[in-house]
Image: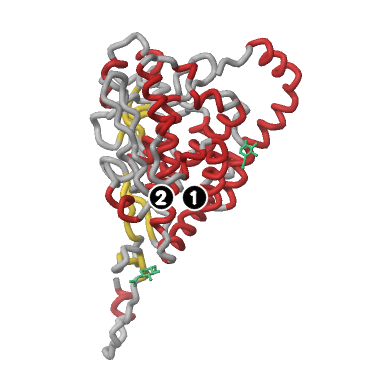
C-alpha cells in the first residue's frame, strides 16, 4: 500500500478539526480500558471457566493469534513497509472506535467482533482443514522479496489496518494484564519462516479439542505476547536481520548496553493508551535487585511495582515487592484455600473461664 502523499496532505488539511474531535473521543475510550475494565474481563473469564467453555474461547484466541503473527510480519505500513513486528504504526487517529466500543462490552463480544470483522475479508481464518493457500503463496513471494505485491496488503486499506492494529493493541493489553485466557493458546506452532528456510505450512488441522491441546507451546503468555504485542526489544529478530543495516532503525528502542538484556515486563506495559503510542517501559536487566531501567534517563532506578494499583486485585490479596518483581499474597487475616484464593480466616475463640487481666494490665 503506497498512500498518495498529496492526497494525504490534502485530507489532513481539510479534516484537521474532525481529527481533533476523533482524538479526544478515542483518548477517552482508550483511557476507559483501565483497572476496572480489567477486573470485569477477569470476572467474565471466571464465568467462562465455570461454564466449561474455556476450549471454545481458547480456539478463538488461537485463530486470532495465528492471524496476527502472519499480519504483523507481512503487512506493509505506509512507506516503510516494515510490518509491525517491532512497533505499532503510529498515526494518531487510527484507533478504531468501532472495535474499541465493541471490546468494551465484554471479552467474548470483543473476540467475536474481531473475528467476524476479519473473516469478512479473510475467510480462511475460520476454515477447517486449511490448505492455507494464500499464506503459502505469500511465503513464496517473500522469498522473492515482492513485499508490495502481497495479496494481503492489497486487500487492506488504511481504515481496515487501523481496525486490525487496534484489535492487536487491545489483545496485547489483555495479554499484558494477564487475563488467564491468554496463558496458553493453541496453534502456536505455526510461524512464517525466515527467508531461505524451508516453508512450514500450517495445515490448519481442525479446530477440535484434541489438536487444541496438542499445540500449546511455550511458556505462559509467550505465544499471546508474540502474536499480539510488538517486540521493541527486537528479541525475536532473526540473526540475518541483526547482521544487516536494517537492524538499527528497526530496533532503535532497544538502547540497552547489552542488547540481549532488554526485557518488557508485562505489568509495566499494560496501559492501552501508552501501548498504542509505542510508549513502552523497557527494562535493561539491571544488576541490582528491585531496580528498573528508565529509558528516559538511561539509568537503573529503584522500583516498587506494587505502587501499581492493577496488581493483586483479587479478593483478599495484597502485593509484595520482591527482588525480581512482585508477588500476590493473602492479606493479614486471610489464608490461601484449596482453590488458591484468599479466604477470610474464621476465628473461633476458645472460651476463657479465668479472671480478667484488666487490673494487672493497667499496671503495665
Ligand atoms: C469492520 O471494521 C471496519 C472498520 O472499523 C468497519 O467499517 C466495518 O463495518 C466492520 N465490519 C464488521 C462486519 O464488523
Ligand atoms: C476459596 O475462597 C474463595 C474466596 O473467598 C471462595 O470463593 C471459594 O469458594 C473458596 N474455595 C474453597 C474450595 O473453599
Percent coordinates x, y for residue 49 in the rendering: 41, 62
Q: State the SS at label 1.
A: helix
Q: Note whether residue 301 is visible.
A: no
Asked whether 25 or 346 is in front, the reply is: 25
Q: Identify the residue shown where x is 55% and y is 52%.
A: 109
Q: Identify residue for label 2.
A: 59
Task: Identify the image quadrant of residue 292.
Answer: top left
The residue at which mark 1 appears reads as 38
Q: State the SS at label 2.
A: helix
Q: CA distance from mark 2 to mark 1?
A: 21 Å
Can the viewer see residue 9 in this picture?
Answer: yes
Across and down, in percent, residue 299 comes to 34, 23
Q: Is residue 84 left or right of residue 188?
A: right
| Colour style of the rendered protein structure | secondary structure
Rendered-image quarter of ligand 2: bottom left
Which residue, as the protein is rendered here, is positioned at the far left?
Answer: 287
Please tell me which of labels 2 and 1 falls first in the chain: 1
Q: Nearer the viewer, residue 262 or 236?
A: 236
Q: Is residue 357 above or below residue 333?
A: below
Give me the residue at 34% from left, 76% from top: 346
Q: Left or right of 23: which side holds 275? A: left
Q: Which mark is residue 134?
A: none
Task: Name the residue rendered at 60%, 26% in the picture.
Answer: 157
Amino acid at each position: 500500500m503506497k498512500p498518495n502523499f498529496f492526497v494525504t496532505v490534502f485530507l489532513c488539511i481539510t479534516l484537521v478539526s474532525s481529527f481533533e474531535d476523533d482524538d479526544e473521543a478515542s483518548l477517552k475510550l482508550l483511557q476507559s480500558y483501565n483497572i476496572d475494565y480489567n477486573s470485569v474481563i477477569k470476572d467474565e473469564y471466571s464465568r467462562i471457566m465455570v461454564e466449561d467453555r474455556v476450549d471454545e474461547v481458547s480456539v478463538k484466541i488461537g485463530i486470532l493469534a495465528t492471524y496476527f503473527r502472519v499480519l504483523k510480519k507481512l503487512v506493509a505500513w505506509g512507506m516503510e513497509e516494515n510490518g509491525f513486528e517491532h512497533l505499532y504504526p503510529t498515526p494518531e487517529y487510527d484507533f478504531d472506535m468501532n472495535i474499541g466500543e465493541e471490546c468494551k462490552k465484554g471479552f467474548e463480544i470483543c473476540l467475536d467482533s474481531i473475528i467476524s470483522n476479519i473473516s469478512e475479508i479473510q475467510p480462511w481464518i475460520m476454515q477447517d482443514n486449511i490448505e492455507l493457500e494464500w499464506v503459502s503463496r505469500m511465503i513464496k513471494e517473500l522469498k522473492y522479496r515482492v513485499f508490495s505485491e502481497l495479496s494481503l496488503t492489497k486487500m487492506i486499506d488504511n481504515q481496515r489496518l487501523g481496525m486490525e492494529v487496534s484489535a492487536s493493541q487491545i489483545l496485547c493489553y489483555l495479554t499484558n494484564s494477564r487475563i488467564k485466557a491468554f496463558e496458553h493458546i493453541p496453534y502456536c506452532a505455526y510461524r512464517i519462516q525466515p527467508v531461505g528456510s524451508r516453508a512450514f505450512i500450517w495445515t490448519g488441522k481442525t479446530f477440535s479439542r484434541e489438536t487444541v491441546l496438542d499445540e500449546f507451546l511455550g511458556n505462559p503468555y509467550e505465544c499471546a505476547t508474540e502474536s499480539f504485542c510488538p517486540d521493541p526489544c527486537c528479541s525475536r529478530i532473526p540473526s540475518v536481520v541483526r547482521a544487516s543495516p536494517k537492524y538499527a532503525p528497526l530496533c532503535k528502542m532497544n538502547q540497552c548496553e547489552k542488547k540481549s538484556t532488554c526485557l518488557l515486563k508485562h505489568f509495566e506495559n499494560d496501559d492501552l493508551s501508552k501501548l498504542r503510542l509505542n510508549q513502552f517501559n523497557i527494562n535493561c536487566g539491571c544488576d541490582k535487585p528491585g531496580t528498573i531501567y528508565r529509558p528516559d534517563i538511561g539509568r537503573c532506578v529503584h522500583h516498587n511495582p506494587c505502587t501499581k494499583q492493577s496488581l493483586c486485585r483479587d479478593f483478599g490479596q495484597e502485593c509484595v515487592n520482591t527482588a525480581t518483581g512482585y508477588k500476590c499474597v493473602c492479606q493479614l487475616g486471610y489464608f490461601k484455600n484449596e482453590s488458591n484464593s484468599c479466604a477470610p480466616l474464621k476465628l473461633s475463640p476458645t472460651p476463657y473461664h479465668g479472671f480478667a487481666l484488666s487490673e494487672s494490665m493497667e499496671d503495665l
